[in-house]
Amino acid sequence: MAKGPSAMPSPMPPQAIMTIQGYWPALHRLAEAGDAQGLGKDERIQAILKQLLDLPPTVRRQLLADALRLSMELPEVHGAAAAAIHQAEQPSDFKRYRAAGSASAG
């Protein structure tokens, strides 16, 4: 994987990510595939576009639609995931306090 100023180091070894199934490891592989295209953002974009244009037109259009859908959903997914992680990492006493507070507020 190419490392550059914009490439973030992975906090866990790749083999740990690859043993998990589903959405998140696929997202991680996509990020790594993008990083592998070049050091700078412009270089990566050009390499990615070249690969896209080498595909048949119907495949290109489907992938473009997929990219649009993901680019629109990812900010919301990121926000919800960050909030869920924050909640999950709170000390258990704080979780009980919040649960009791929200139950009495309703």
Image (spheres, rainbow, N blue to C red):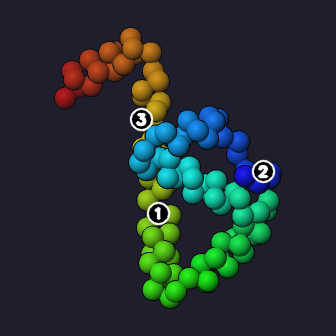
What residue is pinned by disc 1?
70
Dot placed on the residue nearer the N-terminal end, 1 or 2: 2
Q: Is residue 62 left or right of residue 8?
A: left
Q: Position of residue 79 (x, y in %)?
A: 47, 46
**Tag 2's secondary structure?**
loop
The residue lying at 71 percent from left, 42 percent from top is 9
Dot placed on the residue nearer the N-terminal end, 3 or 1: 1
Name which residue type carries label 3.
Ala
Residue 101 is tagged as none
Q: Position of residue 42 (x, y in %)?
A: 76, 69
**Tag 3's secondary structure?**
helix
How far apart are labels 1 and 2 at the CA level? 24 Å
**Tag 1's secondary structure?**
helix
How far apart are labels 3 and 1 at the CA level? 20 Å
What residue is pinned by disc 3?
84
Crowd class of label 2 (few under 14; some 14 to 19; many from 20; radius 10 Å): some
What residue is pinned by disc 2?
3
Residue 68 can be seen, yes or no: no
Which marked residue is nearer to the observer: mark 1 or mark 2? 2
Q: Position of residue 8 (x, y in %)?
A: 70, 45
Name which residue type carries label 2.
Lys
Q: Quadrant of the C terminus?
A: top left
The residue lying at 67 percent from left, 79 percent from top is 50
Residue 92 can be seen, yes or no: yes
Crowd class of label 3 (few under 14; some 14 to 19; many from 20; radius 10 Å): few
Residue 81 versus residue 43 in the image, above or below: above
Q: Nearer the viewer, residue 31 or 77?
A: 31
Q: Residue furthest top?
A: 93
The residue lying at 61 percent from left, 54 percent from top is 31
Dot placed on the residue nearer the N-terminal end, 3 or 2: 2
Q: How many tags in the picture? A: 3
Name which residue type carries label 1.
Leu
